[in-house]
Each structure stands twice: as C-alpha cells, then as structure tokens.
C-alpha cells in the first residue's frame, strides 16, 4: 500500500475511518517507530500488515477503535508477544466485543480473555 517511504519513522493515520488494513501494507517501512491508528473503525488487526517481523521497536497506537477482542489480537496481547511491538496507551485502548470482555481496558486483558493458544 505505502511504497517509497523507506525512511519514514512516524506514520499518523488517526481519524480516517479506517476499518481494514491489507497484509504487507507497512512491510517496506523498515524505519517505522510509531504507527498511530487511533480514532478509526478497526475491529481487528493482523500482524501480517508489517510483512515479516520488523527489526525496530514499533509503538502501536490503537485507542478509540471498536476492537473485537478475540484470538485475532493474540499477537499483541500474548505473553510471548513480539518484542518489537509496544502497545501505546493500553489503558485508553478498549474492547467493545465480545460480550464477555466488554469495555475492558487492554491493560486488564489476559491471553485467556482472548482465547489465545499458547504454543509450546
């Protein structure tokens, strides 16, 4: 999706009514340090938007999205979460679904709440 932005370190896409992000959308952004997706309409987000694991730490901002907190978000919440991802403002990031975890702050969720499968 984004090409030629190899040196971009901060990308702010807040307040754009984004509801879906294609796989590999940020794959060529090797210097990305912060990705702000706050105040959109994202229900879920796949790790594959980054392509392969980035080599730098990325601050991911997801607050004020109607997150469907289920196993599709385990890659962020899992105790074995990627060491390159950091959810910024976890106390301001909430789940709106499913019913068993409504309005939970992201910081209060456990991998069990999301039905994450822990790999051994």
Image: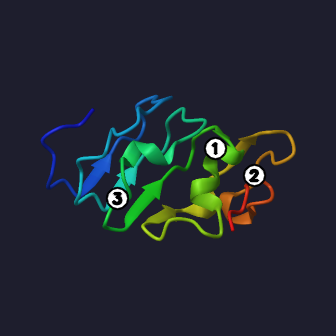
3D distance between C-alphas at marks 3 and 1: 21 Å
Name the spot of residue 2 as percent of width and height, x first.
23, 37
Q: What residue is rendered at 68% in x and 63% in y?
A: 119
- Quarter of the picture containing the N terminus is top left
3D distance between C-alphas at marks 1 and 2: 8 Å
Front position among marks 2 and 3: 2
- Quarter of the picture containing the C terminus is bottom right
Name the spot of residue 6 as percent of width and height, x first.
15, 51
User: Which of marks 3 and 2 precedes in the sequence?
Assistant: 3
Residue hosting label 2: 114
Residue hosting label 1: 72
Please indicate whether residue 56 sits to the left or right of residue 67 in the image.
left
Q: Any mark on residue 34, and which? A: 3
Name the spot of residue 45 as percent of width and height, x first.
53, 42
Mark 2: few/some/many CA within 10 Å (<14, 14-19, 20+): many
Along the line of sight, which residue is nearer the eye, 97 or 111? 111
Q: Residue furthest right?
A: 100
User: Which of marks 2 and 1 precedes in the sequence?
Assistant: 1
Q: What residue is rendered at 63% in x and 62% in y?
A: 91
The number of discs equals: 3
Q: What residue is rendered at 75% in x and 52% in y?
A: 114
């Amino acid at each position: 999706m984004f090409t030629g932005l190899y040196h971009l370190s901060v990308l702010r896409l807040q307040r754009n009514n984004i509801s879906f992000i294609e796989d590999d959308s940020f794959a060529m952004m090797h210097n990305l340090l912060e990705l702000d997706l706050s105040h959109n309409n994202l229900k879920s987000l796949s790790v594959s938007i980054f392509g392969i694991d980035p080599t730098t730490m990325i601050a991911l901002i997801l607050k004020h999205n109607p997150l469907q907190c289920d196993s599709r978000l385990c890659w962020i919440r899992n105790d074995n979460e990627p060491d390159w991802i950091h959810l910024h403002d976890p106390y301001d990031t909430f789940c709106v679904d499913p019913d068993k975890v409504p309005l939970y702050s992201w910081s209060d969720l456990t991998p069990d709440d999301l039905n994450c499968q822990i790999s051994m």
